[in-house]
């Protein structure tokens, strides 16, 4: 369940959440909990973990396997989440209209750099190279490097 007495919610509105993460190493278990406020202000926790074999819902928690994320171990990636689409797929009884990011928690085997929310679909391929450093999730690149050759992107 979503913890009570937690810090005040972030309340960041936006359809999409973009998180810059790195799995510490191959085969290490991890969990990422993303707390979402649905359109009706009910709280839902999306839990991505290596210990889940299949997606299932237990009350206000949606458990999702993190196999694709685990496969990126050792590489910085941007994890992009479409909050309304995830709620429609795994919590269809909740209104999935306007959502907000309430907060998130990471286990010790995940490294975190930054996150932001947006109503726009972002992609490193859609940014002009001269604006790449202005992007909220900009990562360092040598002049001869291409973003998608060095970093990962996961929906």
Image (spheres, rainbow, N blue to C red):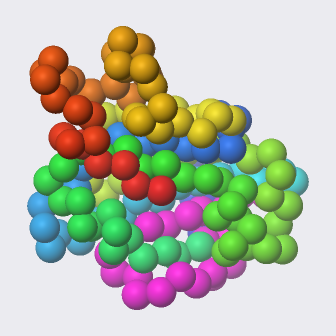
Whether residue 105 appears in this view of the structure is no
> In the picture shown, does residue 19 fall above or below 154?
above
Whether residue 69 appears in this view of the structure is yes
Membership of 141 in magenta stretch: no
- The residue located at (24%, 67%) in the rendering is 71
The image shows residue 88 at horizontal and vertical percentages of 74, 68
Quadrant of the image occupied by residue 137: top left
Nearer to the camera, 140 or 42: 140
Nearer to the camera, 149 or 111: 149
Q: What is the span of residues highlighted in magenta in the rendered image?
A: 42-61
Quadrant of the image occupied by residue 129: top left
- The residue located at (34%, 81%) in the rendering is 51
Nearer to the camera, 115 or 11: 115
- The residue located at (33%, 63%) in the rendering is 69
Residue located farthest toward the bottom when viewing the structure as drawn: 53
The image shows residue 61 at horizontal and vertical percentages of 61, 71
Quadrant of the image for the N terminus? Answer: bottom right
Quadrant of the image occupied by residue 50: bottom left
The image shows residue 84 at horizontal and vertical percentages of 72, 56
Membership of 56 in magenta stretch: yes
> In the picture shown, does residue 53 fall above or below 128?
below
């Amino acid at each position: 369940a979503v913890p009570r007495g937690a810090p005040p919610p972030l309340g960041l509105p936006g359809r999409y959440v973009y998180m810059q993460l790195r799995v510490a190493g191959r085969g290490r278990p991890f969990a990422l909990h993303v707390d979402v406020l649905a359109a009706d202000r009910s709280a839902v926790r999306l839990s991505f973990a290596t210990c889940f074999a299949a997606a299932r819902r237990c009350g206000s928690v949606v458990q999702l396997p993190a196999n694709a994320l685990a496969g990126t171990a050792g590489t910085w990636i941007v994890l992009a989440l479409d909050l309304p689409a995830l709620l429609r797929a795994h919590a269809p009884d909740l209104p999935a209209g306007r959502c907000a990011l309430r907060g998130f928690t990471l286990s010790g085997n995940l490294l975190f750099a930054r996150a932001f929310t947006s109503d726009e679909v972002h992609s490193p391929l859609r940014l002009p190279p001269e604006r790449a450093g202005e992007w909220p999730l900009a990562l360092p690149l040598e002049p001869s490097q291409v973003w998608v050759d060095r970093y990962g992107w996961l929906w």
